Image (cartoon, rainbow, N blue to C red):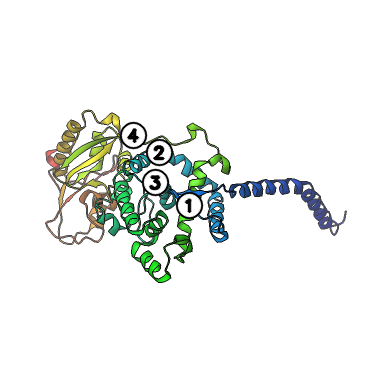
Amino acid sequence: MTAAMRPNLFVCMLAILFSALSPCITAAEGITADFLLSALKLEQPILLCGETVPVDDPQTMERFEKEMLVSLGNRPQVILWLKRTTRYFPYIEKMLRDNVLPDDIKYLAIAESALRMHAGSRKGAMGVWQLMPQTARKYGLIVDDNFDERRNLYLSTPAVLTYLKDLYERFGSWSLSLAAYNMGEEGLEAEILEQGTTNYYRLYLPLETQRFVFRILAIKRIVEAPHNHGVTLSPEDFYAPETFSTVQVNAFADLPLRLIANAAKTDFKTIKDCNPELRGHYLAAGTRLVNIPGDGETGFQVRLAALIEADTRIRSQRIYVVKKGDSLSGIAQKFEVPLAALLIWNRIGINKVLQPGQRLVIFPAAPGRKTDLKDIEGDSDG
């Protein structure tokens, strides 16, 4: 066979292979297309929060179909939605019942954050419910350098439900209330006045808001009947509900979270996961309820008191007095500790200007590394 003949042979082989596989490919595409089309079939009526969605209108139906197809196109995300529902929906559902609000509002949490505690937006929204800082503070949540209660489902949900009640009282329908939740009540009210209609489905709104109610509806349809949309999970596939005990911590000064973790017989990460509203490495001074694993509750207060006493004694023996010309990086290098650790121990920022005579806490370097501690007050006393 000549070299000139080889490309032709290769092309022929590809043609034969494609011919053999094409029926399988066509069949697979047909199955996918049939599945997606069946997912778009709707019975009448379609309700969201007890209100009829006018899917008999072609434009409304098209908007709904778009959100269904977009959601179903991200199957890994759909699976995560479903797996998280057993962890968080029981609490949300109870709160909705207690507040006499539509059960469908729980799907708002998926639309906003996919049920992620630390979800954030470029505009500054945060948490499962994606509250803006000013709205969160208006409804009683703390958002500052020490706490961001938007990140805690159990603290933020009561605030959100009160907010939604206020929106419903103002707008008189859940479709408009959800639209206002997305774009802001002042902006929605302005559009209603200008366009002369209170029908969400006939209002021209920011594109995200025009999609928002349909996105919630699509999520509801998928989560309520996942097997109808190509997702079948076994009971063991779902995430377990969160369980913890709540203890009161009285901190007379900023308290390292590692001490709370040790007193609760757990680790730093678990304390942060149980209390996602806590920012940084310390619990701010004051009285605060803290969630801990249930098996760490017995004896917690006694252990915490002993740990605080021991930590206070150790810290008092690890004081370095800043000298003229010192810098944070220079001090960290001198004692062979990470600069980041020095900042954590002393709760200061990287741009902090040091003053001679200022006192910094410096713990010993990692085991196996030699560190000159002669400049640290109290070290000779053990």
> Which disc, if any, is residue 52?
1
Front residue of 365/113: it is: 113
**How many other residues sit within 10 Å of disc 1, few (<14), some (14-19) or many (≥20)?**
few
Using the image as rendered, state which of residue 355 and residue 297 is in the foreground. Answer: 297
Q: Secondary structure at mark 2?
A: helix
Residue in the image at 57% along x and 59% along y: 58
* CB under 8 Å between discs 4 and 3: no
Q: State the CA–CA distance, disc 2 to disc 3.
A: 20 Å
CA gap between label 3 and label 1 equals 13 Å
Question: Label 2: which residue?
Answer: 87
Quick one: label 4 or label 2, which is nearer the N terminus?
A: 2
Which residue type carries mark 1?
Answer: Thr
Are the two marked residues, 3 and 1, in contact with CB atoms closer than 8 angstroms? no
- Sequence order check, earlier mark of 4 and 3: 3
In the image, which is nearer the foreground, mark 1 or mark 2?
1
* Quadrant hosting residue 371: top left
Q: Amino acid at mark 3?
A: Pro
Label 3 Cα neighbours within 10 Å, binned few <14 / some 14-19 / many ≥20: some
Q: Which residue is mark 3?
A: 102
- Gap between marks 4 and 2 measured at Cα: 10 Å
What element does badge 4 sit on? loop
Residue under pointer 4: 243
Real-space CA distance between mark 4 and mark 1, rounded to the nearest whole angstrom: 37 Å
Foreground residue among 352 and 288 = 288
Per the rendering, the mark at residue 73 is none
